Structures are given as structure tokens and as C-alpha cells.
Amino acid sequence: MNERFPPSHGVLFLIMYVTALLFGQFVAGAGALSVSVQGLIGFAGAWSFFLMLRVFDEHKDYDLDLLNHPERVLQSGKVTLGHLKVLGAGAIATQAVVSLWFDGWTVGPVTQCWAVVIVWSSLMAKEFFVGEWLEKRLVLYALSHMVVMPMALVWMATMGAGRIEAADFALLAALSFLSGAAFEVTRKTKGPEEERDTIQSYSQVWGARGAAAIVAVLLVGQAAVEVLLLKTIAIAHWGWYAGLAATFVLPAAALAKYVQAPSTKGREANEGGVSMAMLGAYVLLLAAMIAVRSIVWTG
């Protein structure tokens, strides 16, 4: 986990989960937002979802990683795929239990949303049974895999709403898709010294300038959706929008520097900047909802 699923990632997962949970409450009714023991324990389901995706990816990419990263703990045999299967089964079971608990131990809206998430995630793990064809089409590959993020956020929002509010969750889903896509493209855009024939990257497909431009477009889309979300929850003061603009200063500067001189260091700076923009989007939305409605502990 230290190597492939570090605990620090849990901070982002927690903020995404709490934002989605409270957004579900926000659109489902008036009154103060609430945090409860059930809501806190629900994070175990959300965290397990991201862990499950990591386990699926480790299985899916095992042979390629054996070629390109033989030093990793899985490829070197310190951890085995058998170990990960047990871990993955536990993660799936945790999600199922949490979903059923929120539904009062019936197959209600939360469990129904989760079922869609788990089916799509399972298809991703099998690369939709067209892996060889899909791997040659990097953009389509990324789109097919990024769709699971809005699905997951809708599932988490349904935990808060208690019912499926598909239309009301559309903007939250769009935010998760655009921010996730921006990070995915950034993560798979390399410096020239990192490029390998055996690993596809967006900088190979579009060039460094083109990949950076795509990330910039996705970040602009993310900002536009965030503006719509702030308007939806009745935020009018200019200070909130100034705060939103501030979250894009770092990624914009990093991308501009990377375009001028692509490098591993520049790629790492891009990842950091885009991560902060993603985190900032969720934190700003969360803070805005609390400012409008307030929040209480219900036990």
C-alpha cells in the first residue's frame, strides 16, 4: 500500500466522499446538513471502492508491470496476486455491507447505484473483453475507465440523499469526470527521459504541448462546472469565485513551464498542481454548502 496505494490518498478520498454525501443531502431537502456515525462509517465503503480499483489495476497490468517495473513489491513476489484477491474481495464485501446498511438492509437506491458501479468496475478489470483492441486506443481507453468516477460519486451522493436524484447529481458527476480526467491525462503525460516503447503516454500521442493543452481544457471545464455548482447552491459573493480562480494558479504555472521544457520534474509539478486544483474544487464546494446550510452532528 505504501508503494501503490499510500495512506495520504485517503485525504482526497475522504473529501470527495464527504462532499458527495453532503451534496446528496443538500439537493434532497432543506435544513442543516448533518454528520452521523453512519455517515462516518460509510467512508469505509468509499475508501474500499478506491482500494478495489487499485487491486483490479494491479491484476490487469501485472504482465506489463513485470516488464517495466520488476522492482515493485508485487512483481518481485513480496506480495502476490493471491494476496490482492483476498484484499479485493474484502473491499467489495465492505462496499456491499455499507450500501445495504444505508438502505436499511434492503436492495434500495444506494445498493442499486453501487451495483452499477461494481458491474462497470468489473468490466474495466476485464477491459470490456476487448483489451488488446482497447489498449491501442488510449483516449477511448481512458474515457471508458473514467466513467466509473461519476458513477461512484453518484453512489456516494445517494447515501446522503436516500434516493436517486440523477438530474440533480449531474453537475457533481461532471465535476468528478473532468477533474479525474485532468489528473489521468497529467499522470500519463511523461517527460522525454521517461518515455518507453512499452508504455503508452499522452505525450507520445499528442506531444507535450498537445497533452498540456488537453489538461488545460479539462481544467477550464472543471472550473465552469464548479461555477454552476456554486450558483446552484446559491453562492453569490465574489470571494468564493476568487477562491476558485486561485486554485488554478499553480497548475497553470506548472503546465506553462512544462510546455517550455518537458521533463520528469515538470511532469511531477503538473501532477501536484492538478491534484491541488481537484482537491480545491471539492473543498470549495464542501465549504460553500456548509456556509449556506450549516452542519450539525446527529450521532
Image: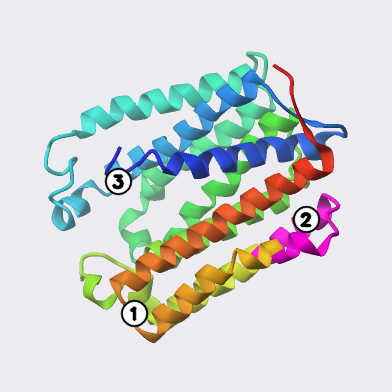
According to the picture, the residue beneath numbered tag 2 turns out to be 230
Residue occupying the point 45% across, 73% down: 254
Residue 165 placement (x, y as % from top left): 76, 39
Looking at the rendering, in which quadrant would you find the C terminus? top right
According to the picture, the residue beneath numbered tag 1 turns out to be 262
Residue lying farthest to the top in this orientation: 105
Residue 256 placement (x, y as % from top left): 47, 80
Secondary element type, mark 3: helix
Q: Is residue 81 visible?
A: yes
Looking at the rendering, in which quadrant would you find the N terminus? top left
Q: Looking at the picture, which amino acid does disc 2 mark?
A: Leu
Q: Which residues are magenta?
A: 223-242
Q: Residues within 10 Å of mark 2 (few under 14, many from 20)?
A: some
Residue 51 placement (x, y as % from top left): 40, 36
213 or 136, nearer to the observer: 213
Residue occupying the point 22% across, 75% down: 193
- Report whether 267 appears left or right of 47: left
Secondary element type, mark 2: helix
Q: Residues within 10 Å of mark 3 (few under 14, many from 20)?
A: some
According to the picture, the residue beneath numbered tag 3 turns out to be 60
Residue 19 belongs to magenta span:
no
Find residue 90 and report its image quarter: top left
